[in-house]
Image: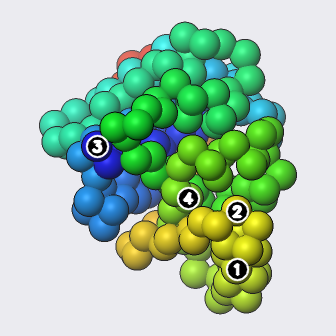
């Protein structure tokens, strides 16, 4: 089984996440894609205006009807800081080949993560560009070569049109009363409105 892993805070999940997930599935020929909202991110401060359950609910709505996607609460159930290596261990088996989707920022720092050696041992890193900044090209090429030399794994790129919007920008727009219907699925927008999130 070719299994993809796509983790994040997803607060809120947006169209960029969805397009990246679809491209990941198609270009890596995945049999299954786990979308996994984290309990607590180890690398950044968590915006706490949406609960873990609400973030999970929004992912359920956003990915509803997309074949092969499983929204999982495994990291939320585990609680505490969500370390990628623990998720990889849980999903690892001789029958599974695991692919980990990263954004550019994650790709450039993957070797600093908790148990980085084991992460590279358990999965194949895959990255998607979420920005059009060509100044990062050299750093990305250099880092991929470094990972290949050190871990024997080549990070592969998912090619998709970058949607230059972040969850933090969407939260800010909602707080300021701006329309975000172009950036998130209608079902997620309605959920946010009903729950009064990010106000």
Residue at image location 58% in from the left, 81% down from the top: 132
Give the Cα separation between the discs numbered 4 and 2: 11 Å
Mark 2 falls on what kind of element? helix
Q: Which mark is residue 1?
A: 3
23 vs 177: above or below: below
| Residue tagged 1 | 145
Residue 144 in picture, x, y percent from top left: 67, 75
Give the Cα separation between the discs numbered 3 and 2: 23 Å
91 vs 28: above or below: above
| Residue at the extreme front of the image, as rendered | 94
149 vs 125: above or below: below
Q: Is residue 2 left or right of residue 73?
A: left
The answer to whether marks 2 and 1 mark residues whose Cβ atoms lie closer than 8 Å is no
| Residue tagged 2 | 151
Q: Nearer the viewer, mark 3 or mark 4?
A: 3
Total numbered circles = 4
Mark 1 residue crowding within 10 angstroms, few (<14) / some (14–19) / many (20+) = some
Mark 1 falls on what kind of element? helix
Q: Earlier in the sequence, mark 4 or mark 2?
A: 4
* Viewer-nearest residue: 178 or 95: 95
| Residue tagged 4 | 125
């Amino acid at each position: 089984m070719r299994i993809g892993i796509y983790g994040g805070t997803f607060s809120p999940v947006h169209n960029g996440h969805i397009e990246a997930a679809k491209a990941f599935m198609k270009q890596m020929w995945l049999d299954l894609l786990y979308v996994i909202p984290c309990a607590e991110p180890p690398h950044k401060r968590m915006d706490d205006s949406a609960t873990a359950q609400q973030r999970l609910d929004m992912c359920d709505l956003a990915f509803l009807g997309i074949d092969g996607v499983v929204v999982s609460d495994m990291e939320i159930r585990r609680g505490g800081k969500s370390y990628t290596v623990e998720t990889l261990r849980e999903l690892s088996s001789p029958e599974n080949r695991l692919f980990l989707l990263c954004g550019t920022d994650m790709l450039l720092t993957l070797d600093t993560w908790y148990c980085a050696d084991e992460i590279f041992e358990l999965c194949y890193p895959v990255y998607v560009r979420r920005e059009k900044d060509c100044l990062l090209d050299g750093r990305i090429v250099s880092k991929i070569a470094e990972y290949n030399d050190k871990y024997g794994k080549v990070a592969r790129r998912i090619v998709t049109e970058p949607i230059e919007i972040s969850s933090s920008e969407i939260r800010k727009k909602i707080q300021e009363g701006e329309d975000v219907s172009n950036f998130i699925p209608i079902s997620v927008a309605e959920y946010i409105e009903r729950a009064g999130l990010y106000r």
